[in-house]
């Protein structure tokens, strides 16, 4: 562990906080350093548990003064575990849970410790929502700063396409508001590469009316997996904006590996019935749960499969088309998946996502609508080697047939530098210039890092 500042310096920091300062022997330290992925077991030298922006400002100033490694935890759901550092100072924003819904302006103000299920409950009381992931326990902050795919993406774009402003603490300790009118270059960077540029302390979103959706899943036996995934590929190619669909190879409740087609139609229910009729009528499904449901119920459809505290390791890649070779590999590997908690998912981000220019936000890969995610998950650490090997082998077999891009929120902790650069695409050079302007010493480097050269 790195040498920490003196007791006097720590005492001064603690006295100036409204929140808590935790050291390794303090009650609450171990709980605070835990994140969703149980593979992450790091021990910060200090944890500042913030209750407002001033605490985050004080933490950044202290880390800068004492040259401490800095990490930032919001929801703590990211698979790479960059929220937690070893030996340095972790800024914990998870206590900042404020949500303000304004139905008259169709906007929301949200603090960084909020999870999507918490935000959805508040907005859902007014039958409102914004684009917010597909797993309710995901943190609002992390998802937003990397882009943000969700069930409403076909109709309303990525989460960042609905972001109106963000308050953040920069590397020099300032609290700035970034928006289209204020610090627009920084606002551009925050929408897709935000973890590199500061600590987000508040988000302002555009809201949309979202009454009941037509959602659920259709499940098929893996024996028909190749045909089902080819059908999905053709079906997804012509789906309307209102419909977002995922396809997944996963283990069903009975222990059998299945192919699940998950759908969310965010429009008139009667129209959705017509649109989804081919998907529901294809083949002889084992089950069909699609029905009119609240959007908040749709948001909880997948979440139970990704609980807090399991061991997780991911590989992923974006693609324009789902190649036959990818389908063959996913089905073949699905037959010998080592963990019943692992899933291979084809995510869908079409429609409004692709009508934003590739350089209009830091998120670049607008022309690659499918996200192949190998979401490895297991319980026993003794099984880690087998599971990680299976995940890497499957990814090696499919990577040559993908589009070359990758979604930054899917990147795990052992990614090569070229994979990280690939996440930012042709926007990397502009991001590098902004990083050198706003964070030249790379204070914010516990992320998928854009490394400044000066």
Image: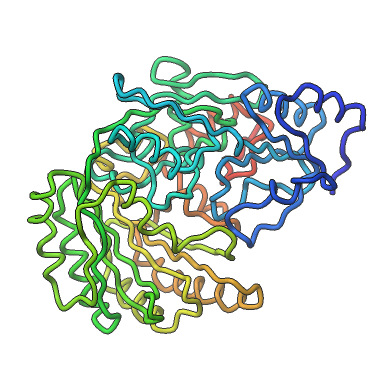
In terms of depth relative to the viewer, which is nearer, 319 or 447? Answer: 447
In terms of depth relative to the viewer, which is nearer, 121 or 7? Answer: 121
Quarter occupied by the C terminus: top right
Residue 145 shown left or right of residue 42 in the figure: left
Residue 413 sits in which quadrant?
bottom right
Residue placed furthest toward the front:
125
> From the viewer's perspective, is residue 347 above or below residue 21?
below
Residue placed furthest toward the top:
181
> From the viewer's perspective, is residue 328 above or below residue 104?
below
What scheme was used to colour the molecule?
Answer: rainbow
In terms of depth relative to the viewer, which is nearer, 407 or 32? Answer: 32
> From the viewer's perspective, is residue 166 above or below residue 86?
above
Spot occupied by residue 288 in the image (x, y as percentages of width and height): 21, 68
Residue 15 sits in which quadrant?
top right
Spot occupied by residue 95 in the image (x, y as percentages of width and height): 61, 36
Residue 173 shown left or right of residue 147 in the figure: right
| Residue at figure coordinates x 35%, y 25% from the top left | 107
Q: How many badges with numbers are in the image?
A: 0
| Residue at figure coordinates x 26%, y 64% from the top left | 217
| Residue at figure coordinates x 33%, y 28% from the top left | 206
| Residue at figure coordinates x 33%, y 51% from the top left | 297
Residue 69 shown left or right of residue 187 in the figure: right
Spot occupied by residue 335 in the image (x, y as percentages of width and height): 39, 83
Residue 236 shown left or right of residue 114 in the figure: left
Spot occupied by residue 420 in the image (x, y as percentages of width and height): 52, 50
């Amino acid at each position: 562990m790195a040498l920490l500042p003196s007791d006097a310096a720590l005492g001064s920091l603690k006295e100036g906080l409204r929140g808590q300062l935790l050291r390794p022997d303090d009650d609450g330290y171990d709980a605070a350093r835990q994140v969703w992925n149980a593979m992450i077991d790091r021990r910060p030298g200090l944890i500042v548990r913030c209750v407002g922006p001033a605490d985050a400002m004080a933490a950044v100033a202290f880390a800068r003064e004492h040259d401490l490694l800095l990490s930032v935890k919001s929801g703590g759901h990211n698979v790479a575990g960059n929220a937690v550092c070893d030996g340095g100072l972790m800024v914990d924003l998870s206590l900042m849970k404020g949500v303000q819904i304004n139905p008259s302006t169709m906007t929301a103000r949200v603090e960084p410790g909020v999870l999507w299920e918490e935000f959805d409950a508040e907005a859902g009381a007014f039958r409102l929502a914004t684009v917010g992931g597909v797993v309710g326990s995901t943190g609002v902050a992390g998802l937003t700063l990397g882009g943000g795919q969700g069930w409403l993406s076909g109709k309303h774009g990525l989460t960042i396409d609905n972001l109106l402003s963000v308050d953040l603490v920069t590397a020099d300790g300032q609290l700035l508001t970034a928006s289209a009118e204020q610090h627009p270059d920084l606002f551009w960077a925050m929408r897709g590469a935000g973890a590199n540029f500061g600590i987000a302390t508040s988000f302002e979103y555009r809201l949309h009316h979202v009454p009941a959706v037509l959602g659920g899943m259709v499940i098929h036996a893996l024996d028909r997996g190749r045909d089902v995934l080819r059908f999905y590929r053709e079906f997804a190619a012509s789906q309307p904006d209102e419909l977002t669909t995922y396809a997944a190879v996963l283990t069903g409740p009975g222990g059998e590996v299945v192919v699940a087609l998950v759908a969310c139609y965010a429009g008139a229910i009667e129209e959705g019935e017509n649109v989804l009729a081919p998907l529901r009528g294809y083949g002889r499904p084992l089950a069909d749960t699609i029905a009119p449901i609240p959007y908040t119920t749709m948001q909880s459809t997948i979440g139970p499969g990704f609980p807090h505290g399991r061991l997780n390791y991911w590989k992923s890649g974006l693609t324009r088309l789902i190649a036959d070779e990818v389908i063959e590999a996913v089905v073949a590997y699905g037959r010998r998946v080592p963990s019943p908690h692992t899933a291979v998912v084809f995510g869908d981000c079409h429609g409004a996502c692709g009508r934003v220019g590739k350089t209009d936000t830091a998120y670049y890969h607008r022309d690659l609508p499918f996200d192949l995610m190998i979401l490895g998950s297991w319980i026993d650490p003794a099984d880690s080697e087998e599971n990680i090997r299976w995940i890497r082998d499957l990814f090696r077999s499919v990577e040559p047939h993908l589009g070359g891009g990758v979604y930054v929120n899917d990147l795990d902790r052992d990614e090569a530098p070229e994979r990280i650069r690939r996440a930012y695409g042709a926007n990397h050079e502009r991001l590098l210039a902004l990083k050198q302007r706003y964070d030249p010493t790379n204070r914010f480097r516990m992320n998928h890092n854009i490394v400044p050269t000066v």
